Structures are given as structure tokens and as C-alpha cells.
Image (spheres, helix red, strand yellow):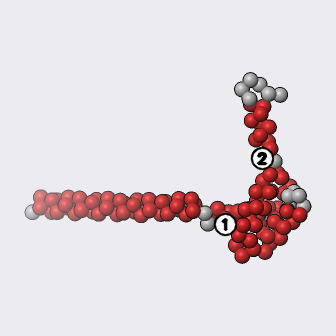
Amino acid sequence: HEDATGVGRGVTRLRSVNDNIVWAQVIVKLLQLEGENAHGKAAMEIVQSLSKDGARIDKLTLQQNLTLLRALADLALDSRPCHEEMEARVQQAHIYRAQRFEERAKQLKRKKIREEKEKEKRR
């Protein structure tokens, strides 16, 4: 059932994209790019099984799913956007630490000045 806004068509498209078979094919293609050296023998055995088995990801065990998830996470972490994000966050952390250090130094300086003024008042 499709209404005037085309929502029905969008839902059908979304269902086809989210279909287990489509995602399994994407996983197979991604992990085959770098192979066993990058992802390990266990992950590649699962990938081979998926490619032979018609990509039935719903038939995998929990351990097999975790192995694939780890391989995909490694792939994502090795990607340029991920590295750029991590570098940006590290730079922000350095800036934050430097700002905290400067603020602490200013506080200590103000405290020292205040203590010296108090000493002078006591004299």
C-alpha cells in the first residue's frame, strides 16, 4: 500500500536494503578486499562459507557473528575517516590539557600573590 507521499515505496526500499542477504553480501565483499592477512583465518572461513551458502548470515552462530563484527570493526578503525577523527580528538585533548595547565598555573600565581599580600599586611 502506497500513499500519495511515496512512503510505501520508501519502506519497500528500506526493507530491501536491510535484508539479511544484502548485508551479508556487503560483509563478504568488504572482508574479501584485504583477505586473511588482515582479518584472520577464522573470519575468512566464515566469509567463504557465506559466499558459498548464499550469504545466509542468519544461520551463523554467535561466535561467528562476533568474529565478523570484530573484523568489520578492525576494518573501520583502519579507515582514513576514523584515523582523522581519532587524531582530531587527540589534538583536542592536548589543547584541553594545555588550557587546564595554564589555568592551574594562573590559579597558583594568584594564590601566591594573595599569600604575599597577606604576609605584607601582617608585618
**Label whose residue precedes the other's in the sequence (1 or 2):** 2
Callout 2, which amino acid?
Answer: Asn
Disc 2 is placed on an element classified as: loop
Does the image show residue 111?
no
Q: Residue at x 77, y 25 (%)?
A: 3
Callout 1, which amino acid?
Answer: Asp
Q: Please provide percent x and percent y for residue 79.
A: 61, 63
Q: Quadrant of residue 33?
A: bottom right
- Residue 82 lies, with reference to residue 16, above or below; the image says below
Residue 18's tag is 2
Residue 5's tag is none
Q: Residue at x 56, y 59 (%)?
A: 81
Q: Residue at x 77, y 36 (%)?
A: 11
Name the image quarter holding the C terminus.
bottom left
Q: Label 1: which residue?
A: 74
- Residue 8 lies, with reference to residue 83, above or below; the image says above
**Disc 1 from disc 2: Cα separation:** 22 Å
Q: Give neighbour class at mark 1: few <14, some 14-19, many 20+ (Cα, 10 Å).
A: few
